[in-house]
Amino acid sequence: MGTDNKTWVREFILLGLSSDWDMQVFLFVLFLVMYMVTVLGNFLIILLIRLDSQLHTPMYFFLTNLSLVDVSYATSIIPQMLVHLLAAHKAIPFVSCAAQLFSSLGLGGIEFVLLAVMAYDRYVAVCDPLRYSVIMHGGLCTRLAITSWVSGSVNSLIHTAITFQLPMCKNKYIDHISCEILAVVRLACVDTSSNKIIIMVSSIALLMTPFCLVLLSYIQIISTILKIRSTEGRKKAFHTCASHLTVVVLCYGMAIFTYIQPRSSPSVLQEKLISLFYAVLTPMLNPMIYSVRNKEVKGAWQKLLGQFSGITSKLDES
């Protein structure tokens, strides 16, 4: 009997956000619109950086990577969630669940490391501007980007392998919007203390370590900005970092709240809302933040739109 109970299920049932049909239709329309805005916004940022030679700098190279991560993260969760909102049977196969956990966890880790890399880039730009081009050369930028992708992917691979080796005792109902690691671990019919410790350790390594590096970078940046005598100089230096700092506060704040809690764990509802924040809201907001708060990006948009208007006028005249 014990051996029969401790088995792997073939599929999981995602309970989602609501069982009310009208609410599910409303959420489907809302999330579909937000997903389309996310994909369009991030690809436009990537296209803009590609087309404008003035944006071929380390900062925008890392921003391209961030946009790729954001649109990939949203794609790993939202399409499946949209299908389930209108489906009667909200099942996800075992393999698909594992793939979703690997993708979302890996891309989340990549983003945290990437934000730390971008903080270092801003540190060099503000604190050592004369040597910026020498320090942040193409080779270093490429290695830092590869490190971000590899570290997040390896961490996710380890967690996915460990999590899906747990016997589920035929438990298949995941009270979540996706195959999130904490929700899947809760299904196990064995002691999961070691899994939770591993999650905590990796959170410290891949979340708190980059966060501390970001914090140290901004302590140095703020210290340097305060030493600038002219008000205009201080304002210019601050605007150099404002967009990145806004994204950092959004991303790290929620993650620390979710995974670094020594005495308590977030409720199931909190976990769902936090997952929605990362899958739906953050990927949509990031390109907006970098467009609205960044003079170089706004200038590039105006230049591109001006060129497009010129081409359109010539076509109309001919």
Image (tube, rainbow, N blue to C red):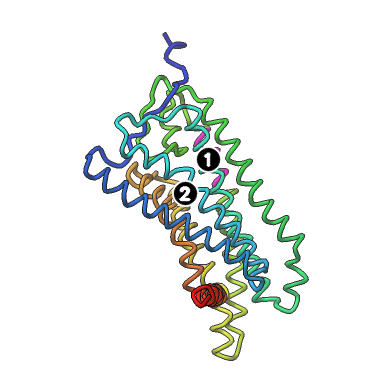
**Relative to 207, residue 59 above or below:** below
Residue 21 lies in magenta, yes or no? no
Sequence-earlier tag: 2 or 1: 2
The three-letter amino acid code for the residue at tag 2 is Ala
Find residue 23 and report its horizontal and vertical position in percent.
24, 45
Which stretch is magenta?
195-204
Find residue 208 and report its horizontal and vertical position in percent.
56, 53
- Residue at (32% x, 39% y) in the render: 85
Which quadrant: the N terminus? top left
**Relative to 71, residue 303 above or below:** below
**Relative to 93, residue 71 above or below:** below
Q: Main secondary structure of the magenta part?
A: helix
* Residue nearer the viewer, 226 or 152: 152
Q: Residues within 10 Å of mark 2 (few under 14, many from 20)?
A: many
- Residue at (48% x, 62% y) in the render: 286
Residue 199 lies in magenta, yes or no? yes
Residue assigned mark 2: 74
Do tag 2 and tag 1 residues touch (Cβ < 8 Å)?
A: no
* Residue nearer the viewer, 206 or 281: 281
Find residue 105 and report its horizontal and vertical position in percent.
52, 43
Disc 1 element? helix
Can you name the residue that lies furthest to the bottom here? 230
Residue assigned mark 1: 199
- Residue at (38% x, 55% y) in the render: 34
Can you name the residue that lies furthest to the top here? 1
| Residue 186 picture quarter | top left
The three-letter amino acid code for the residue at tag 1 is Ile
Find residue 31 and report its horizontal and vertical position in percent.
36, 50
Q: Residues within 10 Å of mark 1 (few under 14, many from 20)?
A: some
Q: CA distance from mark 2 to mark 1?
A: 22 Å
Total labels drawn: 2
